[in-house]
Structure formats: C-alpha cells, structure tokens
Image: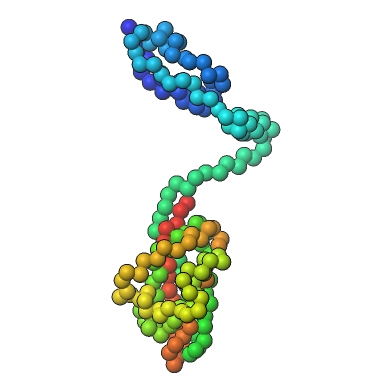
Amino acid sequence: MTDIIGAQELIGQMLVAGLADDDDDDISGEWDDIMGAGKAKPRKAVKRTAMQRYTQQAVAAKRVAGGAIVQEHAYTKARVWPLGFDSVTTVAAGATASMTATPQQPFKPKRLAVAGSVASSFLLTQFVIGNQPQFSSLQFGVPADMFGPTAFGTDLDCDTAQANTLILLSATNLSGAALRFTAGLIGQAVQ
C-alpha cells in the first residue's frame, strides 16, 4: 500500500482557501477509503463565515472586471529608528523654539536624547504626540540635561505616533547666549 504524503495538508489548505465545498460534512470517511483504516482522522472541513464568503466574491468580481484590488496587510517588521529635532537657527536667550517631526510609519518613542553641548542650557517645555502631552505636567518644563549624553534611567513609554502624526518638542533657552538646539527620539517604527 502506498501512502500519499502531505495529502491531508494539501486538502486542508484547499478547504481554508475556500476551494472546497462549504458544507460541514465530515470528510473522514473518504480518508478511510483513500488512506486505509487505522490512520488518524483529519479535521473537519473549515466553514467560512458569511463575511469571508462575501469578501471572496467581491474580490473575484473585481478581478473579473479588471478593477484594482486594495488589500490591507499587517505590519511585518519593526525597527529601532531615530527621529530628529533641530531648531535650524540659534534660539535667542530666553526664547523658546518649537520643533516638529512627522514620522512616515507608526513610531513609538522610547528614549529622548539631547545634544550634550546644549543640554544644560535648555528647559524642555512641551513634548506632544498628536494632541497628547507626553509630560505629566503642562505647568513646568523639565531640564534638557535629564536627557543628555550622561543621563541614565530616562527610558520613556510614550504614545505611538501613527503615520503622519505631528510630534512637537519645545525648548526654552536658559543661557545668556543664542544657541542652536538639537535632539532626537529613538523608538520602534513598524512597516
């Protein structure tokens, strides 16, 4: 007697893909005839829901009509990416610079890093993702050197910025000289 190796998996895939009938008959009787008695019985046929049948019919109709088919897909990879902030010009003494960045993929900041050359000279007054403040108080800012190069224990658990969501960082110059402010966020971005 010859066994057909992989036949159960092939039939199972056909049932899941909707190529077999939608009835819920037990196909184990057919398998006993094909594979011989004493073999393990396969699972029952998978029934599709009404929504799955409707979706499959709609896609088939689009293909026949030659129309475009738009399919949503799940994110397949996550990366650690930086996102930069730069005042571009110098910030006058006592002035505040508001900088924005717009990630192109969903982005969840985990760490804020401020350039060491200016960290002790600035106060971070706002950090907002979309319309959600990321600092617990809007009344007072935090020293930028909390996020300087020698800072530790400053991991963040920020909200996720969806693609094309504005991220705002505002910094006030506390020094007596005009300085350029630069910082960056490091976080997970998914594609």
Specify whether 59 is left or right of 93.
Answer: right
Specify whether 52 is left or right of 141.
Answer: right
Residue 129, how many percent across, how many down? Answer: 52, 66
Q: Residue at x 39, y 16 (%)?
A: 41
Residue 13, how many percent across, how many down? Answer: 46, 25
Rendered view: 145 above or below 10: below
**Residue 90 in sight from this viewpoint:** no
Residue 178, how many percent across, how many down? Answer: 47, 89
**Residue nearest the viewer, comparing 106 with 104:** 106
How many labels were placed on the picture? 0
Q: Residue at x 45, y 60 (%)?
A: 108
**Residue found farthest to the bottom:** 176
Q: Which residue is drawn at 50% across and 24% down?
A: 46
Q: Residue at x 51, y 15 (%)?
A: 25
Residue 138, how many percent across, how many down? Answer: 51, 76
Scheme of image coloration: rainbow
**Residue 20 in sight from this viewpoint:** yes
Rendered view: 27 above or below 83: above
Work out which quarter of the rendered image holds the N terminus and state it: top left
Specify whether 57 is left or right of 168.
Answer: right
